Amino acid sequence: MSEMSIGCALWTLGATPDVAALAGQMEIAAEIGCTSVQPWVVDFEFTPCILDPDVGSDADRRELRRIAESLGLTFSGFCAQLQGAVTYGGLEETEGLQWRIDKTKQALETSAEMGGNIVTTHAGVLPDDKSDPAYRTLLASVGEIAEHGGKLGVYFALETGQERPQALGEFIDEVGSPWLKVNYDPCNLLRYGSDEGTIQGVHALGDKIIHTHAKDWNPETMQATCGEGLVPWDAYIKALKDIAYNGVLAIEDETGNEDMIGSIRRSYAFLRAHLND
């Protein structure tokens, strides 16, 4: 089995309004030892976003792909996080829905252009009641996006959040597309669930997991350096190995450490030690 690798979710280092900013972030990730990066790819939360085709040019994207290759980096994925009028993601909300669907499809196209094959997002709130109109809306919108991904050879990965992993797995099964997968975030699951659920979720979702965020959670310090919070890393890494996961652990430190680069370095060293066990 191939070994898991360590990458970096680049929005940890801030916005990427131009080529120089994104290139600088990639240089930091490579110097730390990461072999892949996950940039933001929609002009929404981290604005402006140079990889959004409505902001950057074809030439900008070609240059950034060249820089990544020169640094020995691959793109583990891209983040296409949008928001509805009410929920984060909003793919279950009818207002403005077609724009969000089309914008996410555009992100899949950008991923393919950049040599990547994964786009991640929080799609929205998954209703418990499958007869809820919002559930049916989410089913249709996610299915449409996954179908578009299949035409491009790009996976659409839903990030774990407040729903139970089992419910997310059932939803993916109902969509029925091999191009719909999971971006697993143990911190999100722990924050809204339990240690046990965080680990069980790995086994519940199994080979649906195609990408992960390496993030920790400490409600006392509000810092997210891996190994300095409450995520049960020993059991979590073991669970990933149990399901033969060989993808990336993308460091995501989203709570604003004063020394963000130092925090990423500590996360990298912590994860590297675990993978070398």
Image (spheres, grey):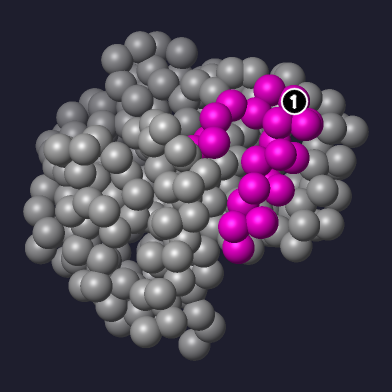
Q: Is mark 1 on a helix, strand or loop?
A: loop
Q: Does the magenta stretch include residue 2?
A: no
126 lies left or right of 140: left
Q: Which residue lies furthest to the right in this view?
A: 59
Look at 26% across and 32% down and name the residue there: 125
Q: x, y (%) of residue 39?
A: 60, 41
Neighbourhood count class around disc 1 (C-alpha, 10 Å): few under 14, some 14–19, many 20 upward = some
Q: Name the residue at 64% across, 18% down.
A: 48
Seen from the viewer's position, the closer of residues 200 and 152 is 200
Residue 159: image location, x then y, percent: 37, 46
Seen in the image, is 70 located left or right of residue 200?
right
Q: Can residue 170 be seen in this view?
A: no
Q: Nearer the viewer, residue 12 or 266?
A: 266
The stretch drawn in magenta includes residue 30: yes
State the image quarter where residue 212 is shown: bottom left
Q: Mark 1 points at which residue?
A: 18
Q: What range is drawn magenta here?
A: 11-33
- 82 lies left or right of 87: right
Q: Residue at x 26, y 53 (%)?
A: 228
* Residue drawn at (41%, 21%) of the image: 83
Q: Tell me where residue 91 appears, x and y as whole percent.
A: 39, 28
Q: Which of 222 and 61 is in front in this view?
A: 222
Q: In this view, does 20 lie above or below 207?
A: above
Location of residue 131 (image quadrant): top left
- Amino acid marked by disc 1: Asp
Helix, strand or loop for the magenta stretch, by majority: helix
Is residue 116 in sight in this rendering? yes
